[in-house]
Amino acid sequence: MDFLYSYLILAEIYVLLGLSTNLLVGIVGIFSVSQAAVFGVGAYIVADFLLSGALPFLPALAIAALCCILLNVLVTLPSLRVAGDYFVVTSFGIQLLATAAFTNWTGGTGGANGLPGIPPPVILGITLADTSQYLEMTTIAAVAGCLCFWLIMRAPFGRLLRAIREDELAVAAAGKGVLRAKVQAAALAGAFGGIAGGLYATFMSFVDPSSFDLDASILLLTMIVVCGARTLAGSVVGPFLLLALPQALSLVAIPTSVAAATRQLVYGLLLIAFALFRPQGLLGEKL
Amino acid sequence: MNAYLEVSGLRKRFDGLQALDGTTFAVEQGRITCLVGPNGAGKTTIFNIITGFLRPEQGSVAFRGHSLDGLRPQAIVAAGIARTFQNLRLFTDLTAMDNVLVGLGGQFGEEPLGAIFRPLYAARVQARRRSEAREWLAHVGLADRARERVRNLSYGEQKLLTVARVLATGAELLLLDEPASGLSAGALDQIMALLRRLQQEGKTLLMVEHNTRVVQQIADEVLFLHQGHLLAQGEPSAIIADPALAEIYFGGAL
Amino acid sequence: MLLLQLLVNGIVTGCALGVVAISFSLVYSTTRIFHVAHAGVYTLGGYLAWTFVTHGVPDPLALVLAMLACTLLGAFIQAQLYARLERRGATHLIVLIASLGALAVIQNIIAAVYTPNILQFPSAWAARVVSLGGLRLTFAQLVTLGISLAAFAGVLLFAKFTPLGKRIRAVASNPFLAEITRLEPRTVYIYVIAIASAVVCLPGVLVPFDLGLQPYGGVTPLLTATIAMIAGGVGSIGGAFMLSVLIVVLQNLSLMVMPGQWSIGITFFIFVIFMLFRPRGLFATG
């Protein structure tokens, strides 16, 4: 039972990341490989606050969200002003820089060894030490995230983003602010990523740089591409499906030394296959 | 004297080609003015500069006495000038209604915080905006096509939609890039009637147009552009009848 | 003295990176595809050369064989992946994602076959040191410098004077026009990526002589190279090369004041400065 709960909790955390990635990559159409970096920043901030006892869980989560919003805004603002490919460089740069920071800034992040012993969250006096309690929290968070996403896409903001994806010149000609909308979407994606990070840190009670590297960003992209970009369904099904993949792979006799590489290899193949044969993914709209 | 729209001394160069070479003209309020001239004369470049998509190397544009120099496209739309595109640039996956709504200003919920935290209020505002959009669609004759995706509309209907979208911005000076091109006779009449109606409602139209029949029938004034500057200006009948201009337009060197 | 040594080291590595930059620039300015899988070709080149060398193949031959393999891989990616995507009307974003997928596949096949641990070239000659008035340079560094400069000159001459090079430049400067004339851009794309893949194999083999081979070690050099390309101005081969040298020299000099793991911060900082103040780069063409 505990194993099932863990899978569900992790999947729900990744739903938030999926929504975040989908916003940026699927809906606005920005190629981002730095989602895991944002995830990591959120995780480390919450971990730091909880380990030092400086702030309880919810305020720490709020600050993590704010920092990630700021991070995404600072990253997208200058680079979105210029051509799209330059954002690719920015995104790679952010991700690699973040991994360097996570690995080397031992004061804040514990370096390559990470931060162990993160205490469970205490919300309104209740300590969520039990997996089933934790599942309730992540379910609430995932549902809230989906609700936000749904509200945005129904609202004029969603329409504006879809129009920008199609033809941002025409949007500017219609008098609407294109850069501002993109930055707002990136800010929102940052918030989702930061909150997911905080949830992850307290669930795993341990964070280290390997969970937030380029490979992790590639996994997030794979979730969106395979299960469906630009739709709510795709953001939700993606994590559940792709987190079950390692379990499926473990049924095949692969030596543990190559297990990680094999997983990443499968993600790469999935990306290529879906890009070639089904760009809209299983449930989504064409990227 | 401050003209309604004043374009002075525009110079613009692209990769070795002098697209605009000291272009100067003025547009009067309430009139339909047509920009004509052979391809490459710089007509679309003028549109791009007026609407803020291109910066000229020299020259300036003033609207109602205020300079538009250096303003971004959004600011120019807010000032009251909006344009259509010769290749339409509609949002093909969106409905006709949605296309108009993108042009409509004053919408609550066009940014994430409002959309998330005040969804009911946003929905109420949207309902009002939708009926406004429906009015614009009706205005151009597309009332019953509101919920169709753009890709399901005929070419003529799509052209009408570009006008609806530009009207939704509330602009008083409309820059129309070849509004009549590629249309069948029936659709052509429909668009010309619409353009005349817009003029009667107080809009000022500056159009790029190649169709001489259209120019003759609705233009109050014609500006003939060639190789980046204004060659002739005057009543349509005079310009069209001029043999030297015809030579340039139809047969002469570009 | 330390300063001078860092400077010289920076110039050598910078020239190697310059070759990465000009090869990437060739592909990008012609096909407009941000070919991130290029990092995979770079990595594969090094590993294949290592495999040949450890099986007794003489070093120069190993290099040539590796270049051949890289050429084939690059051409394959263009012909079977990018060209197909283009035929299906794939968006720019999809092509980027496919390229990223290809990179992941290449890197992880390497990791699975060769393990993620760092491998070193067994060549003894590489580590021999030459002293030039207080400066120490390894043979590997000298060879790297020589070959990189030769490659730079080679690509420049190729682009300027050979028929294929001129054809490539024509396609790059006006892809639309190339479509309707007899330039056949699709074929040109294959040539371009094939050549670029062969060229990038050179630093792919030479740089690991110093730093060792690592399956995921291609991304950071590629990132630095693309930043050099952008800062130098897209389309300018000389600009890309010079900025590469400049960036790596600055990185090396920064070692005097901060630890090496942050050097990517220097690169990124330079990128941000250019984005804010001169996004077109220094020597952009067209």
Image (cartoon, grey):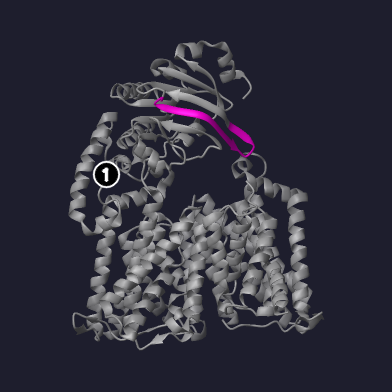
* Residue A39 picture location, percent across and down: 39, 72
The location of residue A131, given as percent across then percent down, is 26, 84
Q: Residue at x 23, y 42 (%)?
A: B129
Does B7 lie within the magenta span?
yes
Place residue C133 in its image quadrant.
bottom right
Position of C235 relative to B5 (above/below): below
What range is drawn magenta here?
B2-19
Residue, x 26% and y 82% (percent of image)?
A: A121
**Does residue B237 appear left or right of residue C66 in this picture?**
left
Q: Residue furthest bottom?
A: A117
Q: Chain of mark 1?
A: B
- Mark 1 = which residue? B106
Is C229 left or right of A156, judged from the image as shown? right
Left or right? Give the position of A139 relative to A211: left
Relative to A64, is B168 above or below? above
Residue nearest the viewer, comparing A197 with A154: A197
Q: Is residue C207 above or below residue B138?
A: below
The quadrant of the image that shows the C terminus of chain B is: top right
